[in-house]
Image (cartoon, grey):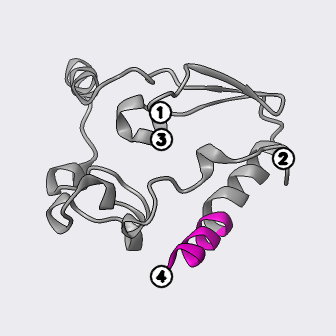
Amino acid sequence: MGPEALEEYNQLVKVEPMKRAINELNVGTWFAGLRRTQSLGRKNTAFLDWSNDRWKVHPIADWSDRDVHRYLTRNNLPYYPLWEHGYLSIGDYHTTKSIHEVSEEEQLRFFGLKRECGIHEIDLASV
């Protein structure tokens, strides 16, 4: 799968359904678990964004991996079960790799061609 096919797949399977749901449900605010430490593209993630007449809230934008661990531990919450097997970033079954299968973390999802699926980059006004 090349970059163009991957982009088309993400648009059809992820982005378009998300756009449709947000618009059909008339969502005024949505929450996402984006963190600044997850990738270079997320390093400037704001706690609150206003875009296309909707708020997008990132309540844990400044959390580190250690903060996530502490929260889960303090609240007796489990990690995602596949985390113990090296799946540090979960995407689709056929585009997600374990850390044991790649040479660098950027290759964990989408064959290392890109880091984001597009959901957090969408223009919600255009459906």
> What residue is shown with label 3?
41
Where residue 19 appears, x then y in whole percent? 75, 50
The residue most toward the bottom is 1
> What residue is shown with label 1?
33
- Which residue type does callout 1 highlight? Gly
Q: CA distance from mark 2 to mark 3?
A: 29 Å
Q: CA distance from mark 2 to mark 1?
A: 22 Å
Task: Determine whether label 2 and label 4 are within 8 Å by CB.
Answer: no
- Of the residues tagged 2 and 4, which is closer to the observer? 4
- Of the residues tagged 4 and 1, which is closer to the observer? 4
Task: Determine whether label 4 and label 1 are within 8 Å by CB.
Answer: no
Q: CA distance from mark 4 to mark 1?
A: 28 Å
Q: Secondary structure at mark 2?
A: helix
On screen, residue 103 versus residue 18, left or right, reads: left
On screen, residue 84 versus residue 62, left or right, reads: left
Q: CA distance from mark 2 to mark 4?
A: 32 Å
Q: Please tell me in which quadrant of the rendered image residue 71 appears.
A: top left
Q: Earlier in the sequence, mark 4 or mark 3?
A: 4
Q: Secondary structure at mark 4?
A: loop
Quadrant that contains the C terminus: bottom right
Q: Is residue 124 magenta?
A: no
Q: Characterize the local packing of mark 1: few (<14), some (14-19) or many (20 or more) Cα atoms within 10 angstroms.
A: few
Q: Characterize the local packing of mark 4: few (<14), some (14-19) or many (20 or more) Cα atoms within 10 angstroms.
A: few
Q: Please tell me in which quadrant of the rendered image residue 66 appears.
A: top left
Q: Secondary structure at mark 3?
A: helix
> What residue is shown with label 2?
24
Where residue 6 appears, x then y in whole percent? 54, 72
Q: Characterize the local packing of mark 3: few (<14), some (14-19) or many (20 or more) Cα atoms within 10 angstroms.
A: few
Q: Which mark is residue 1?
A: 4
- Which residue type does callout 2 highlight? Glu
| Region of the chain picked out in magenta, as a range | 1-12
